[in-house]
């Protein structure tokens, strides 16, 4: 197996070289999705995707069953997800590459989930499908064959907190929350995805797209580190809770903090969509 292991992101050129040298050591997943049209990602994948890539649907594979009170995209059960990924051929020694066409937020969900399953060798294609296409690398409409893999979950490399922890934090202030949604949704304006607008009291706001440059690539590690340190002050990363609308775009913050050598932040998977499902939970609006 190649000695190269990518655990955060990989460039299009690096991925092309890896495929050319050790294709048997790589498995690629297209995670493209649209929250307002749940079939569009699969349709786009069917039309063109990286050669050999499999498609993973956010709702069907990368989320678990909804109860109406556990958020829009609750976590799948660990063994269920591991079996699903193995059915695509994932093996424990594979280098996993995730990409999408939406700025990385859905691919980052897979990145985080695989770390939650104990798999470190997972990386986002930096710049996603656009970056691959921009440098003229090939795309395909051929669907790859399926073969069983041997993937099994291991000790988690990513941690979560539940809604009770977040509720207690309103009093203890043990953790700092970062809300990855847009500033407007954070303020409670123009909410179109959840029944209630606003944010968890005390949460700070940093839009997930702030991790990227204008061309859709990750900012450099020093820039990301400075920006997160400015936001958090002296709060260490392991005392940070990441959340968003449904536990998806917050994963891009987790990845950006990993790139910035600020590991340890925890994910609140239910996020705002779970929090606001109970009218007894407090809601804040405005800029703070």
Image (cartoon, rainbow, N blue to C red):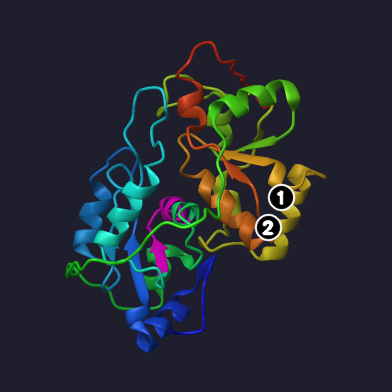
Taking the image as shown, residue 142 lies to the left or right of residue 257, namely left
Residue 126 drawn at (x, y percent): 49, 66
Seen from the viewer's position, the closer of residues 126 and 121 is 121
Of residues 233 and 1, the one nearer the viewer is 1
As drawn, the residue found furthest toward the right would be: 234
Occupied quadrant, residue 92: bottom left
Label 2, residues with CA under 10 Å away: few <14, some 14-19, many ≥20: many
Q: Residue at x 71, y 60 (%)?
A: 223
User: Please, is residue 35 above or below residue 68 in the view?
Assistant: below
Q: Which residues are magenta?
A: 96-111
Is the residue marked by circle 1 packed among few (<14), some (14-19), or many (20+) residues within 10 Å?
Answer: some
Q: Where, quadrant-wise, is the N terminus in this rendering?
A: bottom left
| Residue displayed at 56% across by 15% down | 281
Q: Is residue 264 above or below residue 223?
A: above
x and y, in percent, of residue 2 in the image: 46, 85
Residue to which mark 1 is pinned? 228
Q: Residue at x 36, y 22 (%)?
A: 68
Residue 161 image point, x, y percent: 57, 36
Residue at image position (29%, 78%) is 138
Q: Secondary structure at mark 1?
A: helix
Label at residue 224:
2
């Amino acid at each position: 197996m190649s000695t190269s292991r990518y655990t955060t992101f990989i460039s299009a050129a690096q991925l092309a070289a890896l495929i050319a040298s050790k294709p048997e050591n790589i498995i690629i997943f297209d995670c493209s999705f649209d929250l307002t049209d749940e079939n569009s990602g699969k349709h786009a994948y069917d039309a063109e995707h990286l050669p050999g890539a499999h498609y993973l649907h956010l709702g069907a594979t990368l989320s678990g069953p909804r109860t109406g009170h556990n958020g829009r995209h609750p976590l799948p059960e660990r063994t269920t997800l591991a079996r699903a990924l193995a059915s695509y051929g994932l093996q424990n020694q594979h280098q996993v590459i995730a990409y999408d066409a939406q700025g990385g937020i859905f691919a980052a969900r897979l990145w985080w989930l695989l770390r939650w399953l104990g798999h470190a060798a997972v990386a986002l294609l930096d710049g996603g499908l656009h970056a691959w296409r921009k440098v003229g690398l090939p795309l395909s409409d051929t669907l790859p064959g399926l073969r069983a893999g041997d993937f099994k979950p291991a000790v988690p490399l990513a941690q979560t907190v539940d809604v009770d922890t977040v509720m207690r934090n309103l009093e203890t202030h043990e953790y700092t929350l970062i809300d990855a949604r847009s500033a407007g949704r954070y303020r409670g304006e123009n909410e179109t995805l959840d029944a209630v607008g606003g944010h968890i009291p005390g949460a700070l706001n940093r839009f997930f797209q702030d991790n990227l440059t204008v061309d859709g690539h990750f900012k450099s590690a020093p820039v990301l580190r400075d920006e997160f340190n400015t936001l958090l002050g002296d709060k260490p990363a392991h005392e940070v809770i990441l959340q968003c609308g449904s536990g998806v775009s917050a994963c891009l913050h987790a990845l950006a903090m990993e790139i910035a050598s600020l590991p340890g932040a925890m994910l609140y998977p239910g996020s705002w969509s779970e929090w606001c499902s109970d009218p007894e939970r407090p809601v804040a609006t405005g800029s703070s």
